[in-house]
Image (cartoon, rainbow, N blue to C red):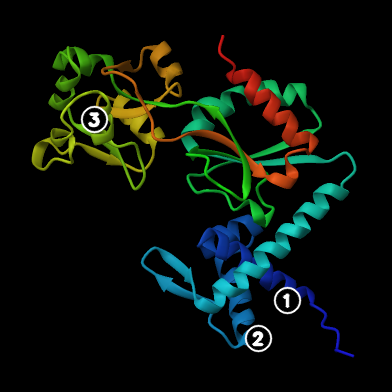
Amino acid sequence: MAEETTLTSRDLLALQAFELAARTGSFKAAAELLHVTSSAVSHRIAGLERQLGEKLFERGPRGVVLSAAGRLLASTTGRAFGDLARALARQGAGSQRLRVSAVPIFATHWLLPRLGQFLAAHPRIELQVEASPRMADMETGLVDVALRYGDGNWPDFAAEKVMSLYSVPVAAPALARRLRFRAPADILRAPLIRVAPFGTSWTDWAAGAGLDPAPFEQRAGLHKGLQVDGMGASVRAAAHGLGVALVFDPLVESEIAAGTLVRVGPRVPARGQIWFACRARDRGLPAIRALRRWLLAELKPG
């Protein structure tokens, strides 16, 4: 008969620290989630490495990256902690915690301003919202619903389109008046605000608007423009008159209505849309069904 292996509390703490560091790519982020110091996380993982006789992480230019042994262990710990999280959620009598990951611009400009209505209608549901540009790894069980930008081609999940998006150039009213934007091509008089590493493409927008895309390629020198790390930052930069930003309609409706931004070119269908995604086996859960119904009702035209 095989000898039974029992995990000690130290083993479990080390594996938890490893799983969070593997998922976030950062000892500091794992420490914040665990409410301990970064050195405590490093110490737990070092102990795990000594126990396994394998290096689990390697230093990369942007932080720690998993080694081959680390990737193998992460595939196991992710599933294990995910199963535990789902089991606890199902066992909790009356508990309806719902963990939602959303594209940052959708979270800040559409979802969060309206969530009060949902929470008032569903007081027993506890929502945890994470604004993240990464595609959520729902198999770990740490996210129940993802509101993502893309084409919906995620075969392992149930995905439903909930919002159509359009790319539109916007600028501060004062900048638009000063540079006298009268035709879409006049946008080239202003610095173009770009989003990196992922953002809407000025050349795609130009082609869709019937313009020559070549002048919209990243330019050198004084007219190069500004580069920021998210669409929310590009909205704020445009509102401060730093240039023209390419953003998503209808997610900037509040800024347009408030007069802090004006559209300075035509709307062009975006490459991706906003999708409601969850694990196929979870789509019938009451809290997920409630959020889906509310979203569709809020987004219904008229």
Res 168 quadrant in image = top left
Q: Earlier in the sequence, mark 3 or mark 2?
A: 2
List x then y, in percent, for residue 302: 56, 9
Horizontally, residue 18 falls left or right of residue 184, namely right
Q: Which mark is residue 51?
A: 2
* Placement of 219 over or under 190, stated as above or below: below
Query: Would residue 140 appear left or right of 131 to someone viewing this image?
Result: right
Q: Amino acid at mark 2?
A: Gln
Instruction: Indicate left or right for 111 with 13 as reference.
Output: left
Image quadrant in which you'd find residue 179: top left
Q: Please tell me the numbered disc located at residue 180.
A: none
Is residue 145 at least partly visible in the picture? no
Name which of mark 1 and mark 3 comes first in the sequence. 1
Under circle 3, the secondary element is helix
Asked whether 86 or 108 is in front, the reply is: 86
Q: Name the amino acid, label 3.
A: Ala
Q: Residues within 10 Å of mark 3 (few under 14, many from 20)?
A: some
CB atoms of marks 2 and 1 within 8 Å: yes
Distance from disc 1 to disc 3, alpha carbons, whole Å, reads: 56 Å
Q: Earlier in the sequence, mark 2 or mark 1?
A: 1
Reading the image, the residue beneath label 3 is 207
Q: Amino acid at mark 1?
A: Asp
What's the residue at 69%, 63% (across, down)? Answer: 79
- The residue identified by callout 1 is 11
The x and y percentages for residue 277 are 61, 40
Which of the two marks, 1 or 3, is nearer to us in this view? 3
